[in-house]
Image (spheres, rainbow, N blue to C red):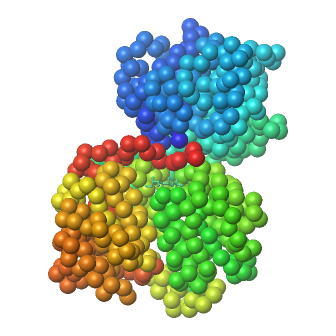
Amino acid sequence: MCGIIAYIGPRDVRPVLLDGLSRLEYRGYDSAGLATLDGDRGSLSIVKKAGRIAELARVVHESTLPPAHQGISHTRWATHGEPTDVNAHPHADGSGDLAIVHNGVIENFQTLKKQLEAEGHVFASATDTEVLSHLIGRAYSESTETGSQRLSGAVKQALRGIKGTYGIAVMHRDHHGLIVGARRGSPLVLGIGEGEMFLSSDAAALLPYTNKVVYLKDFDLVELRAGQFDIQSLTSGRSAFEIEELGFAPDAAERGGFPHYMLKEIHEQPQTIENAIRGRLNAEESSALLGGLNLSPAALRDVERVVVLGCGTALHAGMIGAHMLEDMAFVAAESECAGEFRFKNRPLPRNTLFFAVSQSGETADTLGALREARRRGHIGLGICNNVASTIARESDGGTYMHAGPEIGVAATKSFVSQVAIFGLLTLLLGRMRHMSAGTGTGIIQAYAQLPDQITRILEHQAQIESIARKYAQARSMLFLGRQYHYPVALEAALKMKEISYIHAAGFASSELKHGIIALIDPETPTVILCPQDSLYEKNISTIQEVKARRGPVIAMATEGDTGIKDHADDVIYVPRTLDMLQPILSIIPLQLLSYYTAVALGRDVDKPRNLAKSVTVE
Ligand code: AGP
């Protein structure tokens, strides 16, 4: 997944592009580049560099790049071709008159590249994107169109010949004052300023400049000029669009004084819960209100099975959601790794309801699984954070997380938000089946306490930081949990892996004896989730089995449980809530544990190696 920023207007384009790229760096950061079109001299200049955006900024500042008022730029997460200067975007065609930046994958690029090479085209890079620049350049040179249609028409013709996904921005030296953008499958947002226009892969990067945006749809093509825009469709003439106002404040995507976005987002989680449940609790009926599902009570009542689709953290939240639905709403439910489901051939009841869970709303595997479920005639709903994202727009309905931008690559508040939303769904469906009004009221009351309970946990972060420092040199860590806490163990292990780079694995505690116990030794700390619930004694036994083999144990326990100190080396306490909502509290200290471990090891917490915030490629 990559990030695109384009600008046209009165400003000096260079700082606008570099600032925008820095806000998109979470989308990929192995190389970056920009192109400017200087009207005075009619020169199209390209500067691009392997490495972080700071490296590109250094090169730009040292270059003789003339001031310009339009440009396109890109920060890359390599899919085809190593992260090198030559593979970085923008890419030119053979004429050197055209530059393009691209987010997505051109699946048939090898075939096209061979055809173009046979025609004499010479390629500089190993990327799929460069094929698109040559296709546009060829269509442009053969075109008989005049004016902006010559460039837009060439872009349309080239895009009709490719298979795959794209979000692009294109400039040509013959067309000073014009930028062309287009999307299919990769997000692209038009930002509307006063006498200036923007394109971005993520609306959050436009916040310092404008809050008026158009979320381009698949097959849209847009012509940008300083004071106007024109949206066309690749498939049919004009394209309808809606100008939306961004709901979050300009500083929402800033760090707010925190050293890392991840820590800021961990601390936002009391508000995350409030945002997830706002207007969705129905105290009068001891139920929930989820109008966005677009399903009547009768249709919801008839659901025979729920399947939750997701990847990574979203999958872990989905596992908890499925467990809630079975445990409390008595609905048959399961979670599926989206990348696996889409290629399975599962016999499912006709009235199976699917949920695609995705913070970004752009994860290719989750989108593919949603499309497969809907192709089979099932209803597919979305639980997404990014309004108007592809998954949100292709779903039959759904529930927005309203969590605000999540910039840290490691998902934190999105997990808590998704689990909270599944609790609302459980309340709604449960009250249509066997859940009593009293139980429903108890769930609503438990929700009301969660923000303060999270705040209480965050007040103990210094203790968690000291535990993190104590074990930061471990080669490996294990995380064990039962029932609702098995997915919590998986999520906590994922957090630890992806930002500290320590090998970490999560397991169901019951599995310890079936082989995992061979890993226990004095150098391998085990985090054991041990809330004071109906399985407490079994979890104490698990702690004892690890201790008997001299394995260090970090217990996550319920406030007031002093007895557990006799068993564990370190104890992290969290408040008690309902079993179904306990994962929301239990994950908080484990997010902090991974965060402080990564900090102790000097990792790049917000942009861990090899990762990107949203995996829009398969
Ligand atoms: C989690 O910390 C990772 N960043 C990753 O596993 C992520 O959860 C996964 O790629 C799904 O992303 P999505 O929620 O945007 O679909």
Q: Specify whether 191 is left or right of 349.
A: left
Q: Residue at x 75, y 20 (%)?
A: 139
User: On screen, 256 above or below 326?
Assistant: above
Residue 450 falls in which quadrant of the image? bottom left
Residue 288 in view in this figure = no
The answer to whether residue 424 is left or right of residue 533 is right
* Image coordinates for residue 9, horizontal then vertical, percent: 57, 25
Q: Residue 500's x, y, as percent?
A: 31, 51
Q: Is residue 158 left or right of residue 246?
A: right
Residue 114 seen in this snapshot: yes
- Can you say whether 328 is above or below 273 in the image? below
Count of number-bearing discs: 0
Can you tell which quarter of the image residue 201 is in? top right
Q: Is residue 543 left or right of residue 38?
A: left
Residues 144 and 563: in front is 563
> Residue drawn at (56%, 7%), measured in percent from left and top?
41
Q: Residue at 66% x, 25% y: name it.
A: 113
Rendering quarter of residue 137: top right
- Where's residue 184, x and y in %? 68, 41
For the view shown, which residue lies furthest in the top direction? Answer: 41
The image shows residue 82 at horizontal and vertical percentages of: 47, 30
Q: Residue at x 52, y 72 (%)?
A: 321
Residue 304, placed above or below residue 487: below
